[in-house]
Image (tube, coloured by chain):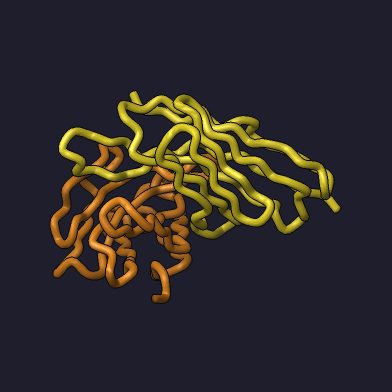
């Protein structure tokens, strides 16, 4: 069964204290791995898609990396405005390629204190 | 391009009533997805359209739920005879084939 596990569930950082969020996955053929940011009461906001092991993408203070079993979201020198829930999801390469739905983890709730 | 729009943003209904939500996807996107998210959980897939055809339904989508996408444009999700367990955030997303997967702001449903 395709599955995504994120850790830790919650993370508290001081402003400027760099850290990483983990996303472990099992999927029958990976089409893509997605990272989203979600603020309370809002829909997920797209951050990155990674397609193959070894791929890395960066955006401001965020950097996402991918291996065959897990992905990391590295946050460098975070600011209070980075506080949010970060969601990881996988898209499976199913037979016939007709699906495309995302399988999400439960998310990591990040709090950055000034 | 105004992104994915969902209406209403919030809905409070009494148990047993029917509710309908609307989603307007990004205009050039051919795929439209519905998800449900409860507190502390990630979004869970409900159903998916490619153009006007509904191609996939999750086992979460009981017979009280129905979704349509007439003419391959906007979509509606209807819940009949609502139950308290239906209280959740209902999210719509759209993509062009497998790319550009974008979510709307969601509709928060509260069943009292």
Name the image quarter holding the N terminus of chain B. bottom left
Q: Image point 33% across, 64% down: which residue?
A: B21
Which x, y percent locates residue A76? Answer: 73, 46
Q: Residue at x 20, y 41 (%)?
A: A97
Asked if one can make out residue A68 in the rendered structure from this viewpoint, the answer is yes
**Quadrant of residue B63 in the image?**
top left
In this view, the residue in front, A32 or B18, is A32
- Name the foreground residue: B78 vs A92: A92
Q: Residue at x 29, y 72 (%)?
A: B27
Question: Which quadrant would residue B19 be assigned to in this image?
Answer: bottom left
Task: Tell me how many marks there are.
Answer: 0
> Residue B67: image x %, image y %?
22, 57
- A28 up-or-down from A36: above or below: above
Q: Is residue A63 left or right of residue A35?
A: right
* x, y percent for residue B34: 32, 53
Q: Which of the two residues, B17 or A109, is positioned nearer the viewer here?
A: A109
Chain B colour as displayed: orange
Going by the image, does A109 lie left or right of B108?
right
In the displayed structure, B108 sits above or below A23; it is below
Please tell me the colour of chain A: yellow
The residue at the far front in this view is: A54
- Residue B12 visible in the picture: no
User: Which percent across, then down, holds residue B32?
Assistant: 28, 58
Q: Residue at x 75, y 50 (%)?
A: A78
């Amino acid at each position: 069964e395709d599955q995504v596990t994120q850790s830790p569930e919650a993370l508290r950082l001081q402003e400027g204290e760099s850290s990483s969020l983990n996303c472990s996955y099992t999927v029958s053929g990976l089409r893509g791995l997605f990272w989203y940011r979600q603020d309370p009461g809002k829909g997920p906001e797209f951050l990155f898609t990674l397609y193959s092991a070894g791929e890395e993408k960066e955006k401001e203070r965020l950097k996402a990396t991918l291996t065959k079993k897990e992905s990391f979201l590295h946050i460098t020198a975070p600011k209070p405005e980075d506080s949010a829930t970060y969601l990881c999801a996988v898209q499976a390469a199913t037979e016939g390629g007709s699906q495309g739905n995302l399988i999400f983890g439960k998310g990591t709730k990040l709090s950055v204190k000034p | 391009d105004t992104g994915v729009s969902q209406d209403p943003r919030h809905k409070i209904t009494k148990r047993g009533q029917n509710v309908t939500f609307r989603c307007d996807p990004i205009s050039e996107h051919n795929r439209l997805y519905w998800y449900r998210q409860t507190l502390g959980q990630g979004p869970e897939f409900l159903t998916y359209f490619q153009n006007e055809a509904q191609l996939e339904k999750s086992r979460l989508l009981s017979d009280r739920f129905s979704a349509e996408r007439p003419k391959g444009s906007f979509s509606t999700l209807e819940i009949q005879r609502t139950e308290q367990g239906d209280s959740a955030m209902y999210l719509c997303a759209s993509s062009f084939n497998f790319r550009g997967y974008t979510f709307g702001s969601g509709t928060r449903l509260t069943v009292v």
